Image (tube, rainbow, N blue to C red):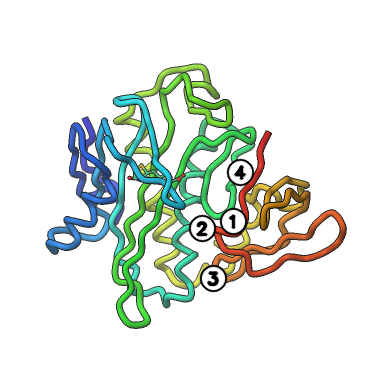
Amino acid sequence: MYNSIQDTLIIGKKVIYLPSCHSTNDIAAEIVHAGLFTEGTVVITDHQLSGRGQRGTSWFANPGQNLTFSIVLTPAFLPIQNQFLISQTVALGIKAYLEKYISGVQIKWPNDILVGGKKICGILIENAIQGSKLNTSIVGIGLNINQMNFENDLATSLFIETGGELSLGDEFAALMRCLDAAYLQLRGGNRFTEIRRAYMGSLYGYAQEVKFSYKDRVYTGTVTGVDELGQLSVRLSNGEELTDLGIKEISWIRS
Ligand code: BTN
């Protein structure tokens, strides 16, 4: 069902399909551990039994209706202080893919993908560092394609947004091409500023008032920046500035 992609340079040239598995990120980590991979290898499943999300959450997706996979990257060219560029690059690659179908795609810091304020895709990146370099980066992606119903109404899928069922195999190939193009830009090494700028321009809450909780209080504010380490800055509606925020420090409140 999922074929290796012939016309990409790195991502998706080797595809390992498992009808079901616990977590594709965990399988990818096992493959890395065993040294049995080339850069860009993808592990994909139709039925993930214990999908993992950010901040220790679980990721659920109806079997056979969505894209659930992990990519193994070896970004040794990136100093570890620049590792957030992987997140930014992957989010921009997914955004470019979605924009073939829909407009209004936003990235919710650090790397959720929203359409019309609803989450269509989650990304879990797990980096292994050796010395001052990134050894491997496992990029786990859960993208809602044909699922029609979700437990809460803060989630959506391409089916809901476009009104039509899509071929998972074809969409996987199209997504691989967008991710490969985005990753090649990063590997080129001279587009970091452009990548960061494109990310900022797509960010939920940038030049737009949003609600979030911080230290058990609810605030309204706008995002003012994301630094090289991926830490967020926001300006509260009272003019106060919060800087150097990490992923565990704030939670977005979408209604
Ligand atoms: C999040 O939004 O919290 C991140 C969700 C990431 C889910 C994907 S599905 C494929 C890969 N395998 C996992 O166990 N998690 C990621």
Question: Mark 2 or mark 4, which is nearer the start of the sequence?
Answer: 2
- Secondary structure beneath label 1: helix
Q: Which residue is mark 4?
A: 106
Question: Mark 1 or mark 3, which is nearer the start of the sequence?
Answer: 1
Q: Is residue 27 left or right of residue 141?
A: left
The dot on residue 229 is 3
| Disc 2 packing (10 Å; few <14; some 14–19; many ≥20) | many
Q: In the picture, residue 195 is in which quadrant?
A: bottom right
- Secondary structure beneath label 3: loop
Q: Which residue is mark 1?
A: 199
Determine contact: label 4, label 1, CB under 8 Å: no
Determine contact: label 2, label 1, CB under 8 Å: yes
Question: Mark 2 or mark 3, which is nearer the start of the sequence?
Answer: 2
Marks 2 and 1, how far apart at CA: 6 Å
Q: Is residue 7 above or below residue 138?
A: above
Which residue appears farthest toward the right when viewing the image?
A: 238
Q: In the picture, residue 147 is in which quadrant?
A: top left
| Disc 1 packing (10 Å; few <14; some 14–19; many ≥20) | many
Marks 4 and 2, how far apart at CA: 12 Å
- Secondary structure beneath label 2: helix
Q: Nearer the viewer, residue 250 or 225?
A: 250
Marks 3 and 2, how far apart at CA: 11 Å
Q: Is residue 5 above or below residue 222?
A: above
Question: Mark 1 or mark 4, which is nearer the start of the sequence?
Answer: 4
Residue 37's spot in the image, x, y percent?
A: 17, 58
* Residue drawn at (35%, 35%) of the image: 67
Which residue appears farthest toward the front when viewing the image?
A: 216
Marks 4 and 3, how far apart at CA: 20 Å
Q: Quadrant of the N terminus?
A: top left
Q: Is label 4 or label 3 in front?
A: 3
Q: Which residue is mark 2?
A: 88
